[in-house]
Image (cartoon, helix red, strand yellow):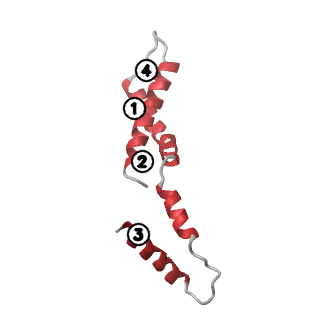
Amino acid sequence: MLKRTPLLAFIIAGLMTLLIALLFQEEDRSFTTGQTVIFYFFSFFPSMGIAMLFDPFPNKIKEMYLKINFYIQEENPEDQVAKVLKEELEGKN
């Protein structure tokens, strides 16, 4: 997970809370501050899932581990993982 994902989740949760407040709040019965905070707290969890949909890190890890062939009997899978990680580190430098 990238560092921006929780920040994006906080922003999405704020937008969800604002949308809920605008849709369901009546003029003669407005939400209290506590209710708005509870809406924000509960909207953070689905917004974290939405933010994770835009996170490129899991796809990168998936592509990296798809390079490993666990059916090769001659090589130890741990050695293959170490080799792929080493190639990734060398590719970044």
Dot 1: what SS? Answer: helix
Quadrant that contains the N terminus? bottom left
Q: Earlier in the sequence, mark 4 or mark 3?
A: 4
Q: How far apart are marks 1 and 2 (CA)?
A: 21 Å
Taking the spot 47% from the left edge, 79% from the top edge, the residue there is 83
Instruction: Give residue 37's mark.
Output: 1
Query: Which one is nearer the viewer's eye here, 75 or 12?
Result: 75
Q: How far apart are marks 1 and 4 (CA)?
A: 10 Å
Q: Which of marks 1 and 2 is nearer the N terminus?
A: 2
Q: Position of residue 46 (x, y in %)?
A: 52, 41
Q: Mark 2 points at which residue?
A: 5
Q: Mark 3 points at which residue?
A: 91
Q: What residue type is disc 4 on?
A: Phe
Dot 3: what SS? Answer: helix
Instruction: Look at discs 4 and 2 and give the one toward the viewer.
Output: 2
Query: Which one is nearer the viewer's eye here, 77 or 27?
Result: 77
Q: What residue type is disc 2 on?
A: Thr
Q: Earlier in the sequence, mark 4 or mark 2?
A: 2
How many badges with numbers are in the image? 4
Q: Name the residue under label 4.
A: 31
